Amino acid sequence: MNSNKEIIILLPVYNDWASLNKLFKYINDQAKKKSINLNVLIVNDKSSKKTHLKIKNLGKIVKIEILNLKQNCGNQVAIAIGLRTLLKRKNISRVIVMDSDGEDSPFVLNKMLKVLEKNKDKFVFASRASRKENLILKFLNNIRLIFTYIVTGKYINYGNFSCFYFNKLKEIINKKETFSAFCSSVTKYSKIIKVPVKKEARYQGKSKANFKFLIMHSLNIINVFSSLVLLRSLLFIFISFIFFKGTITFIFIFVLFAILNCLNLYLIRTQKDVLYFDKFVKNIIKIK
């Protein structure tokens, strides 16, 4: 491998600059342990709070850029726009994607990069071995995982936190699904390997995860596999017809899967073309 090529970390941010500053320190400490230099691309999702970064004493983070968006697009779109921006560059070897609030632990970066070295043809994702959330959110998230598995056959217990070789980016970056659910899009179009990692608590503030968020997040993940969901829905309806014909159970299953597939169809019809999102890029500012 060309040692002159960059390892770049993509960090979507909305307002939480204090957490990002804390994350920078920990990332820099991890880079020291492995004696590697890192570059960072921050995707500023039109934060309403003024940018405030502390970049002193970050010797191993050699370059920091901010990609400013013209409007708030949400976490998934921000990540996809950032990755699409990286695609235009040439001197990159590996890409790390992680959230900036502290829930994605910087202390496992070296472990994930080590796994990547042995699996160069795969995306390495941090799967959630345990979560620091209240019991209600844990319960709802488990229900989400089970339901998603039932309708897609995929156990997607991982989010954005991942690393991969730059040449793998072309497999997913021109797919519409990447702009709605990054982890699902990668699962559909590429190979993955999971590394069990504990999900940490946010450095500051409360988690944005709530019932509404989990529902929308689940629908976006499921929608990526819409054709598979339709086939599995027909199978479940057929089986329930055999065993529960004429009962309230059959009616419930039929209505549930009918609604799910109608929602999938709606989401497909409202998906934007990849090129549509290029207009949301305001500028890129180099601050280090």
Image: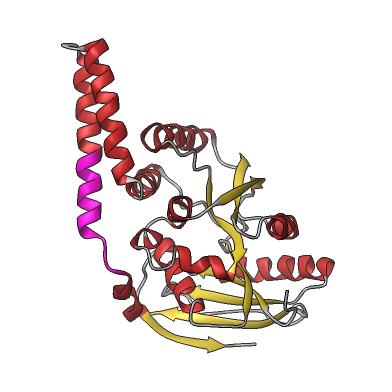
Spot occupied by residue 172 in the image (x, y as percentages of width and height): 44, 63
Q: Measured from the top left, where is residue 121 in percent x and y?
A: 60, 58
The magenta region covers 261-273
- Which of the 4 image quadrants contains residue 244? top left
Q: Position of residue 281 (x, y in %)?
A: 39, 81
Who's the residue at 28% across and 35% down the image? 231
Q: For residue 245, what is the image quadrant?
A: top left
Q: Is residue 244 visible?
A: yes
**Quadrant of the snapshot with the N terminus:** bottom right
Q: Main secondary structure of the magenta part?
A: helix
- Image height check: is 132 above or below 68? above
Q: Is residue 145 left or right of residue 231?
A: right
- Considering every residue shown, the one lying at the far left of the view is 246
Which of the two residues, 17 or 42, is positioned nearer the viewer here?
42
What residue is shown at x 52% (from left), y 36% (from top)? 138
Q: How many marks?
A: 0
Residue 131 seen? no
Question: Residue sitting at 60 percent across and 43 percent down?
Answer: 128
Q: Quadrant of residue 98?
A: bottom right
Q: Nearer the viewer, residue 87 or 137?
A: 87
Magenta-span inclusion, residue 49: no
Seen in the picture, residue 135 relative to 174 is either above or below; the reply is above
Relative side of 175 to 285, left or right:
left
* Residue at 48 percent of width and 50 percent of height: 187
Q: Is residue 262 magenta?
A: yes
Depicted 65 relative to depicted 177: above or below: below
Name the one closer to the observer, 74 or 89.
89
Q: Give the image's coloring scheme.
A: secondary structure
